[in-house]
Image: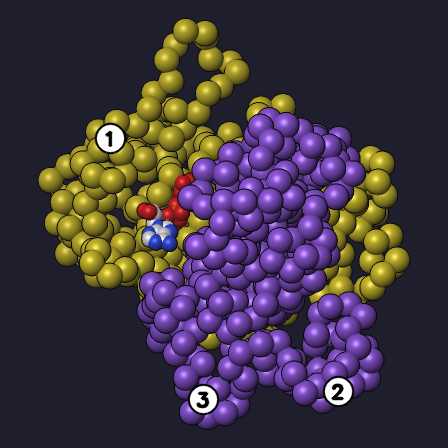
Chain colours: A purple, B yellow
């Protein structure tokens, strides 16, 4: 298991090398550069040259790359051109927002999807099964930003139950020891702040969690149906185990194997792909930050952000594979 | 032939001792699924199993052996299955028993061992857990007590190093070991009846002999009643006092072991006997398979279902299905469902 993890992590090196070269070339192939965003379209050639020199953009590309990578190995990703603060700091802060949002979305998807998929799988063709099938298809088909605006319109604007944008009411000033706002409120004992953060979190989490919810429901349903027909379930029945033991210990535990994998993969996807949701709800996460960095040609942020997301993706996948071993003894001793 | 039609089947296995432990009457199982023709898997099976008796049910694949036992224990589910008749265990009707009560009988009073020990064990639970859970359920043993008892059970089925083995997962054991674990689980609560459904089919010959020996020493010798389901008459020969031969959902012959082997009366039984490999047979003599397959048989309503494959077919075979009755002059415990039975000195 350890050698497996180490081998996976070593694989990160070629991935990051290749990716860094690609990103480096890609951002420089974009029309315009940070100077356009900073100075506007009409600026003097002298000013432009000045700015480009300040960011080292006047040097040959391979020189730029080598000096960049020289700093990256020391975990120095440079300074954001937009905000003039260290890229690592900017990414860390916004990644916490993304992590909070993804965590809430996956929690929502798991808490609703697994029970729903389970009931549907145990009673195929029942009304609840049919409902979950239609719901899942809808959930996958509806574009995230449409769903986001819809939720916002109904539950925030019309009904006023939840908040429309941001992570917390600006009037609330509270400490952020972890950077996860709901948690921060609870830790510091500022429950109104936690409640406010929660009201900001609910709608984007639902919007973001809908596709994982649909997928988790479908996978759970299929797995439960398949496992229910396995011989060992019949054995458990023949042993006279109670219905709840047969269900939990024998059916669910085996049916969870594929579900765990899908939860992990979906988490990885959400961490890097919450751009639309974050934008609709102005949630201030990494995805929307990266998107705006592309518009402002904030090269250091784009480069650092993509390398960071790649690392996260590989780590999440590694965790998925390791957790599979925890759940399935056949994988563990293989 | 009208007389045969009017006659009612005699009850196989009846009349050994006082009250039977298991009493199956006219059990019928039909599978119905949307868009397909209903499948009659069991078509009026009756039989008695006396306390401590050892009974074999023999027949080709698809003859309804497994479905009979699963239906009796309520293990077929409810969707798309129609079950009629009655199954009484110690006087209690299993088919109409409330679910909770039936679950309390299963595993405690009646245990089962299945064919494929790999797929019949839960792959993500240790075998220790799979044994202790039944001890917890029916004997109220918990924690270390349950584990000690489980280790003892493993030892009793011939698995050494039991304490360590409890922590193994099914995939870490050999096929024979897994079947021993299944038997340990089945015997955990000292049931009064054990149903073993092809317990050795998935195992190779030497291992299969060991498992049968284990069944003999733990079940037969301890007065636990045994219903052994198999398609191998050789297996039955070693273990069972009473044998029922099934064909196409019905019992076609039923007799004490000795009588069945010495004097098989149904042409299907003689066919089965002829296809059993025997050690005393000269090499190179091909085994005699029964020609045809059960799938192209007639349903019993049109006469004998075996008739299309039968070498002793007579015009009377087609028309009305024969009843299961003793032949004139033969023992009353030897029943056969045939209009043209095999004469005594045939084999
Ligand atoms: N769930 C089911 N749905 C539909 N048909 C079924 C089902 N289970 C069994 N059958 C049918 O019932 C018949 C009897 O099956 P059964 O499993 O009892 O045979 P068997 O005598 O145990 O054979 P084998 O030696 O293969 O185990 C077969 O024709 C089978 O196709
Ligand atoms: Mg079978």
Q: Is residue B225 visible?
A: no
Q: Secondary structure at mark 3?
A: helix
Q: Are the residues flagged by discs 3 and 1 from a single subunit?
A: no
Q: Would you place residue B85 above or below residue A263 in this image?
A: below
Q: Which residue is mark 1?
A: B292
Residue B53 horizontal/vertical position (percent): 59, 51
Q: Is residue A80 visible?
A: yes
**Depth check, front residue: B1 or B61:** B61
Quarter holding residue A190: bottom right
Find out if the beta carbon at label 2 lies less than 8 Å from the nearest ligand 1 atom. Answer: no
Dot label at residue A157: 3
Q: From the viewer's perspective, is the residue at label 1 or at label 2 nearer?
A: 2
Alpha-carbon span between mark 2 and mark 3: 24 Å
Q: Residue at x 11, y 40 (%)?
A: B315
Looking at the image, is mark 2 or mark 3 earlier in the sequence? 3
Q: Residue at x 71, y 70 (%)?
A: A180
Marks 1 and 2: CB-CB under 8 Å?
no
Q: Would you place residue A214 above or below residue B202 in this image?
A: below
Q: Secondary structure at mark 2?
A: helix
Q: Which residue is mark 2?
A: A191
Dot label at residue B233: none
Q: Would you place residue A87 above or below residue B217 in this image?
A: below
Furthest residue toward bottom: A159
Alpha-carbon span between mark 3 and mark 1: 75 Å
């Amino acid at each position: 298991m350890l050698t497996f993890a180490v081998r996976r992590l070593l694989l990160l090196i070629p991935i990051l090398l290749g990716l860094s070269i690609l990103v480096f070339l890609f951002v420089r192939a974009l029309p315009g550069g940070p100077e356009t965003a900073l100075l506007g379209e009409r600026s003097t050639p002298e000013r432009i040259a000045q700015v480009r020199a300040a960011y080292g953009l006047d040097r040959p590309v391979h020189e730029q790359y080598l000096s960049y990578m020289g700093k990256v190995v020391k975990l120095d990703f440079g300074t954001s051109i937009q905000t003039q603060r260290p890229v690592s700091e900017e990414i860390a802060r916004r990644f916490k927002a993304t992590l909070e949002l993804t965590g809430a979305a996956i929690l929502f998807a798991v808490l609703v999807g697994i029970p729903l998929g389970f009931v549907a799988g145990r009673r195929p063709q029942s009304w609840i099964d049919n409902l979950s099938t239609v719901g899942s298809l809808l959930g996958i088909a509806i574009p995230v930003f449409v769903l986001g605006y819809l939720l916002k319109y109904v539950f925030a604007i019309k009904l006023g139950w939840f908040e429309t944008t941001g992570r917390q009411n600006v009037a609330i000033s509270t400490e952020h020891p972890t950077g996860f706002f709901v948690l921060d409120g609870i830790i510091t004992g500022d429950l109104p702040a936690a409640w406010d953060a929660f009201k900001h979190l609910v709608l984007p989490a639902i919007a973001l969690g809908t596709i994982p919810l649909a997928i988790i429901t479908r996978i759970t349903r299929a797995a439960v149906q398949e496992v229910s027909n396995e011989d060992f379930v019949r054995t458990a029945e023949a042993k006279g185990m109670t219905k709840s033991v047969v269900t939990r210990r024998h059916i669910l535990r085996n049916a969870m194997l594929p579900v765990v994998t899908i939860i992990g993969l979906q988490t990885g996807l959400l961490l890097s792909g919450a751009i639309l949701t974050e934008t609709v709800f102005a949630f201030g996460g990494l995805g929307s930050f990266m998107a705006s960095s592309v518009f402002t040609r904030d090269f250091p942020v784009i480069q650092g952000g993509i390398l960071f997301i790649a690392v996260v993706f590989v780590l999440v996948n590694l965790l998925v594979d390791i957790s599979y071993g925890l759940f399935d003894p056949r994988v563990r001793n293989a | 032939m009208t007389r045969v039609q009017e006659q009612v089947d005699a009850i196989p296995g009846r009349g050994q001792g006082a009250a039977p432990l298991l009493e199956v009457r006219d059990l019928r199982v039909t599978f119905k699924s949307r868009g397909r023709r209903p499948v009659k898997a069991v078509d009026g099976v009756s039989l008695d199993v006396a306390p401590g008796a050892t009974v074999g049910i023999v027949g080709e694949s698809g003859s309804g052996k497994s479905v009979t036992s699963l239906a009796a224990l309520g293990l077929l589910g409810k969707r798309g299955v129609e079950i009629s008749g009655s199954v009484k265990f110690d006087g209690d009707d299993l088919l109409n028993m409330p679910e909770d009560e039936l679950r309390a009988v299963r595993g405690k009073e009646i245990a089962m061992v299945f064919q494929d020990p790999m797929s019949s064990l839960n792959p993500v639970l240790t075998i220790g857990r799979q044994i202790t859970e039944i001890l917890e359920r029916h004997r109220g043993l918990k924690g270390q007590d349950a584990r000690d008892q489980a280790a003892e059970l493993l030892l009793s089925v011939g698995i050494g190093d039991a304490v360590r083995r409890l922590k193994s997962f099914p995939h870490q054991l050999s096929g024979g070991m897994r079947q021993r674990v299944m038997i340990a689980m089945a015997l955990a609560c000292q049931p009064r009846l054990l149903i073993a459904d092809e317990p050795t089919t998935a195992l190779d010959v030497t291992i299969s002999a060991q498992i049968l020996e284990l069944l003999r020493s733990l079940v037969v010798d301890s007065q636990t009643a045994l219903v052994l389901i198999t398609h191998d008459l050789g297996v039955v020969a070693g273990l069972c006092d009473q044998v029922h031969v099934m064909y196409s959902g019905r019992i076609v012959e039923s007799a004490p072991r000795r009588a069945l082997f010495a004097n098989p009366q149904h042409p299907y039984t003689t066919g089965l006997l002829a296809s059993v490999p025997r050690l005393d047979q000269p090499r190179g003599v091909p085994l005699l398979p029964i020609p045809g397959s059960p799938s192209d048989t007639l349903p019993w309503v049109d006469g004998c279902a075996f008739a299309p494959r039968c070498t002793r077919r007579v015009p009377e075979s087609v028309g009305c299905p024969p009843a299961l009755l003793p032949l004139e002059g033969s023992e009353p415990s030897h029943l056969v469902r045939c209009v043209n039975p095999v004469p005594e000195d045939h084999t």
